[in-house]
Image: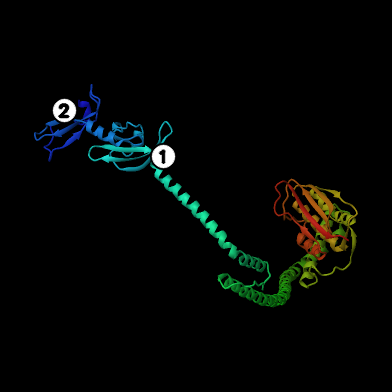
Amino acid sequence: MQSGWPASSSACGPSRPWPREPAAVLGAPYVPPGRGGPVILVRVASRSPGLWVAVELVLDPLTARLSGQSGPQVDVALLDGQGQIVVGGDVGLVDPSAYRAFLGRTRADGIRYNLDDGRRVLSSSSPVQRAGWTVVVAEPDEVSTAATRDIRDRTTFVAVVASALSLVLGVLFSRRLSGPVIDLKDAALAVAEGELGRRVRPTGGDEITELAQAFNFMSQSLARNAQEISAQRDEIEAFNRVLQERVEARTLELRQTQDRLVQSARLAAVGELGAGMAHELNNPVAGILGMVQVLLRRRSDGAEQPMLRTIEELAVRCKDIVGRLVGLSQGTLEGPDAPTAEVGPIDLDALLDNALALVAGPLRQRGLGVQRAGLRGLVVQGDRAELLRALAQVLLSLRAAARQGGTLVIQLGLRDEDVLCELILDAPVIDVGGDDWMASGLGFWAARHTLARHRGHLGEPDGPPASGRATWTVALPRA
């Protein structure tokens, strides 16, 4: 019998302080041998310290009570604190595992679960105070929702009857309204499509007639408003056109003025720089050139003759650069739209041959080979002397960019109305934007300025090439 008591107690109980009031402890229900129903032990503290009185309670009345409340579609059961069925549950609708979270602690309603046979069960549970038990009432979900289904069926029936009645009344009433309503519908569609001012004929003296009169008034008002809006829109569009023409003219005038101011500022700055440099460099360069020419006459057949010729050539180039700066400071270099001196058709192949002949020496000194490819017989429009000088300046700048020799491929082709001359530099090391003592100083700037005057342009690489190959593009108008 001791197995029915809690683990912390025994038959006599250990010595403990005198309780303030008698206490009772329920044991676990069990079925004694030879008995068909469960019993439960109740331990009650006596007045004597450390003594308890054990009473065995028979649960037959509770079993009969719960069985009387059960039925074919309702199952009532009593669960102990471990979730075991103590009494009841004869119908087989109670699943103790569904109530483990609520045993002896809280009331739960609307618990749904499925039985092994597939039936859906709806149940509720309520704890028994101070006993740790739980009373469970369960019934099939189809039984619990029978009233709801009945209400739903009745509601559906009433709705169907009401719909049928409304349909009949609507058909009877529509015979009287269909004609005027159709006229109003057609007139409304016509107004929506732009037929403003459309009218319908009012008939009778009911609300439909008032609606027709209101529609006619609305249609006439829309027509008047549309005419007024159209007239105002025409006035606004005319004003906008005049205003746009004035704004465009004023904007063009301001842009041209700004361009002239920017160009004047640039020319003034470069001219001031050129005048200063020309003043400082002209005399030393003239002196160097004069002394070199004297040495050339004295040593006309000496070993220093090639070196002196090179010095003379470089001094002449310096003098040419100083002369260009002086010309820029005096305003002799015009803008991109200024006409050239001797404009005419030029054979591009011959022009390239002359430019390569001028820079053949510097290219050989750097070990830079030249290859020609692409179309032949192309003709461009421009001044031969200026274009020759611009191509020579570009080739010398490419010679400066190739630090360790390589190959320069000249590819000729067409693009729209322009002739393209692609200068492809393939070298171990390419220094984009680099310069050396053989470069002409102004380099790409002077060439770009000359090409712009001929309605062309010079395209350069954006930055250092990653593969040892870079392309410069010279575009000129086709003759």
Q: Which mark is residue 142?
A: 1
Q: Residue 407: percent from the left, percent from the top?
A: 80, 47
Q: Which residue is most to the left?
A: 48
Instruction: Tell me the SS state at disc 1.
Output: helix
Q: Which residue is mark 2?
A: 11
Taking depth in this image into account, of 359 and 201 the one nearest to the observer is 201
In the displayed structure image, the side of residue 186 where residue 102 appears, left or right: left
Residue 74 at least partly seen: yes
Q: Nearer the viewer, mark 2 or mark 1?
A: 1
Q: How many neighbours does mark 2 have within 10 angstroms: few (below 14), some (14-19), or many (20 or more)?
A: few
Q: Position of residue 369 (x, y in %)?
A: 82, 47
Q: Nearer the viewer, residue 341 or 249?
A: 249
Of the image marks 2 and 1, the number of the one nearer the N terminus? 2
The amino acid type, in three-letter code, at marker 1 is Glu
> Could you tell me which secondary element the residue under label 2 belongs to?
loop
Lateral position of residue 124 relative to residue 237, left or right: left
* Residue 84 falls left or right of residue 178: left
- Rounded to the nearest angstrom, the CA distance separating label 2 from label 1 is 50 Å
Quadrant location of the C terminus? bottom right
- Pick whichever, 170 or 90, lies toward us: 170
Residue at (61% x, 75% y) in the render: 217
